[in-house]
Image (cartoon, helix red, strand yellow):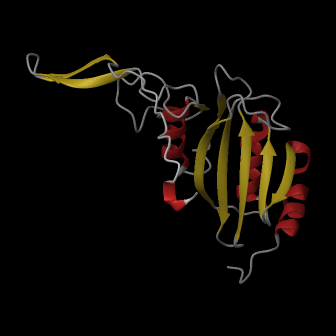
Amino acid sequence: MSAFAIQPEELRGLLSAALGDRVRSIAVTLDEVTVEVNAANYLDVMRTLRDAPGCQFEQLIDLCGVDYSAYQETGRDGARFAVVCHLLSVSLNQRVRVRVMCPDDDMPVVASMCDLWSSANWFEREAFDLFGIIFEGHLDLRRILTDYGFIGHPFRKDFPLSGHVEMTYDTVQRRVVYQPVTIEPREITPRIIREENYGGLH
């Protein structure tokens, strides 16, 4: 293992040479390197990051979904959903972040990383469960955190805080049943201080 990680700008140059025009951009922000890639090149770029000399990112340490909703960010082409990965090279003591935008907001799909890193399995299932992102090529893409009959994807910005259904135990049927949410939205009104001399101020 290297005693010291290379500097972010040096890593940026190395990755730029290895990936060429297959990426949208490679930026350094707050001493962290972020690679932006199109969905069409995602799998190929990730394979290069794992295998190419000078890259050697042996570990996928995190993968998550992102819902940008109506948030506008330069360079996103208006896409709503993204997948963000964090890779670690133990042998070279360096890290990189990769972000890929899902090209279709109605059916967000990107390639699965399970064939490259086995750790992607549960990460991708979580992103599917919570954001509804489909990982093409994943062999067991099913919910991992929500219940079997759960409707919707709770980390999407438009998912209601109270949910769509609630579970109760039915003593007659002797089992758990689902029913529409009975919680009414409430408005929290802040306390207004009206005392003229509050806190000893005159």
Is 171 above or below relative to 34?
above
Is 166 above or below relative to 72?
above
Residue closest to the far left: 172
Along the viewing direction, whichever of 179 and 53 lies nearer the viewer: 179
Q: Is residue 140 left or right of residue 72?
A: left
Rendering coords of residue 24 (x, y %):
86, 42
Q: Residue at x 70, y 29 (%)?
A: 80
Along the viewing direction, whichever of 21 and 181 lies nearer the viewer: 181
Rendering coords of residue 138 (x, y %):
55, 35
Rendering coords of residue 87 (x, y %):
66, 58
Would residue 95 be visible to someone looking at this image?
A: yes
Residue closest to the far front: 202
Would residue 139 be visible to someone looking at this image?
A: no
Along the viewing direction, whichever of 181 and 75 lies nearer the viewer: 181
Along the viewing direction, whichever of 129 and 113 lies nearer the viewer: 129
Residue closest to the far bottom: 3
Task: Give the quadrant of residue 101.
Answer: top right
Is 175 above or below relative to 195?
above
